């Protein structure tokens, strides 16, 4: 029988896998430098995106996932990358 800490660790790993899949599957943020940390259902986003829209979409994508209680969005917006691409 698994202990409580092992069960919580497994569910945390499953949640991180779902979060990672959601990030990779999002057309708004896939391919960007986005990674996260999770503890007790709180997901903290780190990395860089090109626009405030992408930052918001990353947060909205994760808020819908089962097991995510709160999203702390610490993504940095590198607006120069989107201006340089035009």
Image (cartoon, rainbow, N blue to C red):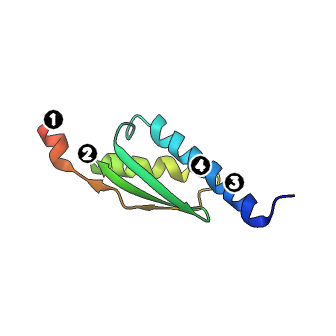
Q: CA distance from mark 2 to mark 4?
A: 23 Å
Closer to the chain start, of discs 3 and 4, is 3
Badge 1 marks a residue whose secondary structure is loop
Q: Which residue is mark 3?
A: 10
Q: Which residue is mark 1?
A: 85
Side of 43 where 50 appears, left or right: left
In this view of the protein, which residue sits in the foreground, 17 or 1? 1
Residue drawn where x is 25% and y is 45% of the image: 50
Q: Which mark is residue 50?
A: 2
Q: Which residue is mark 4?
A: 65
Closer to the chain start, of discs 4 and 1, is 4
Badge 4 marks a residue whose secondary structure is loop
Q: Quadrant of the N terminus?
A: bottom right
Q: CA distance from mark 3 to mark 1?
A: 41 Å
In this view of the protein, which residue sits in the foreground, 69 or 34? 34
Q: CA distance from mark 2 to mark 3?
A: 33 Å
Side of 54 where 66 appears, left or right: right
């Amino acid at each position: 029988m698994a202990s409580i800490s092992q069960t919580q660790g497994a569910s945390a790993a499953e949640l991180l896998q779902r979060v990672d899949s959601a990030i990779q599957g999002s057309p708004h943020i896939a391919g960007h430098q986005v990674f996260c940390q999770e503890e007790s259902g709180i997901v903290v986003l780190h990395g860089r995106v090109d626009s405030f829209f992408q930052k918001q979409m990353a947060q909205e994508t994760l808020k819908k996932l089962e097991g995510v209680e709160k999203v702390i969005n610490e993504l940095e917006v590198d607006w120069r990358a989107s201006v340089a691409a035009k």
